[in-house]
Image: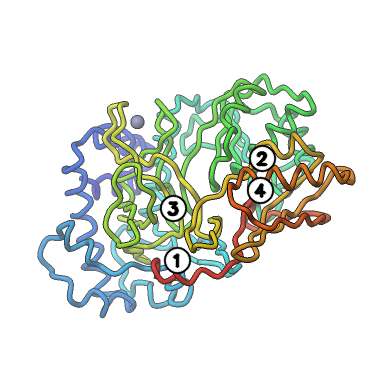
Amino acid sequence: MLESFATLAAHRGQAGLEAAVELLEETQRWPESELLQQQLLLAGRLIAHARKSVPWYRERLAHTASAPLTLDRFHELPILSRADLLDHRQELKSSETLPGHRTVREANSSGSTGRQVTVEIDSASAAVTRVIALRDHAWHGRELTCKAAGIRAIVSGASAPLGRHVPRWAPSPRSGPLALLDVHTPVRAQLEWIEREAPAYLATYASNAAALVEAGERHGVSLPSLRELGTFGEVLPDGLRDAAMRVWNVPVVDSYSCVELGYLALQCPKGTTYHVQSESVLLELLRDDATPCAPGEVGRVVVTALHAFVMPLIRYETGDYAMAGEPCRCGRRLPVIERILGRARNMMVLPSGDVLWPRYASNILGKLFPLRQFRLVQTSLRELVLEIVPARPLSVDEERGLKSLVVETLGHPFELELRTVDDIPRSPSGKFEDFVCRVPRTSLTARSG
Ligand SMILES: [Zn+2]
């Protein structure tokens, strides 16, 4: 059933795409056990294919029984780390071409070390991604004929003041036009561009969305045509949903995806939790001992891409952490992620060795102090540096107040140094992290190895 869904999506043009979206209306209400069984069927095929034609897996999966795959057997399969993917990309490619699966493009995702993870995207996965995009639009009631705008990392041709214009933003002939702008554009210029373009839907990285809303409030920019602020690619900042409602009277709709795997989870239309896109990926949230997380527990995100046969990613550890959620009351039975917490490099290490996701009043610092940008960098178990780009030089009192606010909200007696810098650039991938840990974490690395 799930395989026929991918085939529909890939091979019958627009009618196929729409039929596949309709099929997803059914699968999202399947009992959990039925969906899992279908996922294991596909995963079993993927594993057999990988064992036969992918050098990396030939030996690693040699002892996997060819009998039907069970969840227990699946849990015994080795985990593929980002480091494995970085170092063994060629060995992860299949030597066999299967009908319906070919490479459509390469996708690059930047890692914490600055090295890029490159994955070959399978035509079947790409088709599934289009279907899930349509599902997302349907879930959130978007009118496809409207205009949309996207602000993201774009290689070329989308710089301010004009950006770039393409005829469609949704994979549908009814789709309205899309205006694109490079996210490295200064925020004020981005706002002017949005005002001129007047889109109904705007999508950008979560940190950029927060910066836009904040600047919109500060400069009194209203966006009357805007219906929704879509976010992706980063952890949603605290307070962004409220701020977007207050400033522009629009909801924030987040989605969870990654370059290597496409959509992993979409925001539930009835709330702020996320539904795993189980028709496309088998997503696990694992504790340190590799057992599955219960609702309320935070674990490592490990994903198997069910339709990617060109370069199989089986139990691929994305580097993200997320909290498992309770079953959703909206009627959809797709597994629930309560919150997405971010990557290991965004976790703070306490002197005790414990790690946690820090909260340091980052949602209000820019309002309380004249700061254009800031980023907290942990340099040792006891020391942090708050890099700041001030709008004007801070007074001694302001510096003292800023430092004590940050240390107090962190809740741990760190030594904090303020360091004034000219700019805190986004990474080439367009992302911005307001907390970065530079302390080597042997224990964490060992556990997630
Ligand atoms: Zn739901």
Give the amino acid at mark 3.
Tyr
The circle on residue 444 is: 1
Tag 2 secondary structure? strand
Residue 347 falls left or right of residue 12: right
Give the amino acid at mark 1.
Leu
Q: Residues within 10 Å of mark 3 (few under 14, many from 20)?
A: many
Of pointers 2 and 4, the one earlier in the residue sequence: 2
Ligand 1 contact, mark 4 (Cβ < 8 Å): no
Q: Return the x and y of residue 89 as percentages of the image width and height.
A: 44, 74
Report the residue marked by disc 4: 407
Tag 3 secondary structure? strand
Task: Answer above or below: position of 339 versus 153.
Answer: above
Q: Quadrant of residue 23?
A: top left
The circle on residue 165 is: 2
Report the residue marked by disc 3: 321
Write the residue at 42% across / 48% down.
Answer: 322
Q: Of tags 2 and 3, which is closer to the observer? A: 3
Tags 2 and 4 touching, CB below 8 Å: no
Give the amino acid at mark 4.
Val
Residue 52 falls left or right of residue 420: left
Q: Return the x and y of residue 358 as percentages of the image width and height.
A: 56, 49
- Which quadrant of the picture is home to ligand 1? top left
Tags 2 and 1 touching, CB below 8 Å: no
